[in-house]
Amino acid sequence: MSIRSLPEIVGETKANLRCLTPQAARDMLADQPEALVIDVREPLEVSEKQAAGTINLPRGVLEMKIPEYTTDPETPIFLHCATGGRAALAAEALERMGFRHVSIIDCSCDEVMQALGAA
């Protein structure tokens, strides 16, 4: 048996998630002011560039820190990272926790910033 690669794992994970374009996410966010937009990149990455209105909760501490922002399983949550991989893994973790409306913005950070504006 061989070890599965990260791209294989991410691809399988994304197949079971709601993946959005940055434009679709922007449109949905306009109708959901209570939604959280979470950037799961590391703080150093976020210090270089960040999309407007996002919360930085790095992938490694997401499950521990999300209760500081919401414990309501109905809260719409949009996740993004640099390329979509960490966001996919983070979305899977949040769904396992019981959050029901988790989406990933499946694109580069630059594309998220173009759609949402820069912080």
Image (tube, rainbow, N blue to C red):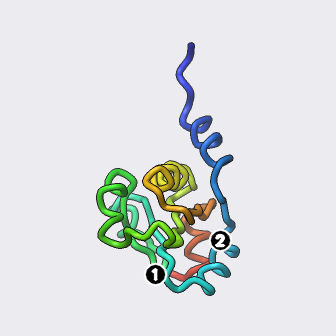
Residue 13 x %, y %: 60, 44
Counting labels gives 2
Q: Give the answer, above or below, for where 53 lies relative to 62.
A: below
Residue 6 x %, y %: 54, 36
Given the image, on which type of amino acid does mark 1 rest?
Gly
Write the residue at 59% across / 63% down. 103
Residue 63 x %, y %: 35, 55
Query: Residue 22, labelled with which disc?
Result: 2
Residue 114 x %, y %: 61, 77
Q: Give the answer, above or below, for where 4 lies relative to 40.
A: above
State the residue in front, 108 or 92. 92
Write the residue at 45% across / 66% down. 39
- Alpha-carbon neighbours of circle 1 within 10 Å: few (<14), some, or many (≥20)? some
- Alpha-carbon neighbours of circle 2 within 10 Å: few (<14), some, or many (≥20)? many
Write the residue at 56% across / 13% down. 1
Q: Quadrant of residue 19?
A: bottom right
Q: Give the answer, above or below, for where 83 lies relative to 78.
A: above
Query: Residue 24, labelled with which disc?
Result: none
First of labels 2, 1 by sequence position: 2
SS class, disc 2: helix
Residue hosting label 1:
53
Given the image, on which type of amino acid does mark 2 rest?
Pro
> Whole-Å distance between the Cαs marked 2 and 1?
14 Å
User: In the image, 34: left or right of 61?
Assistant: right
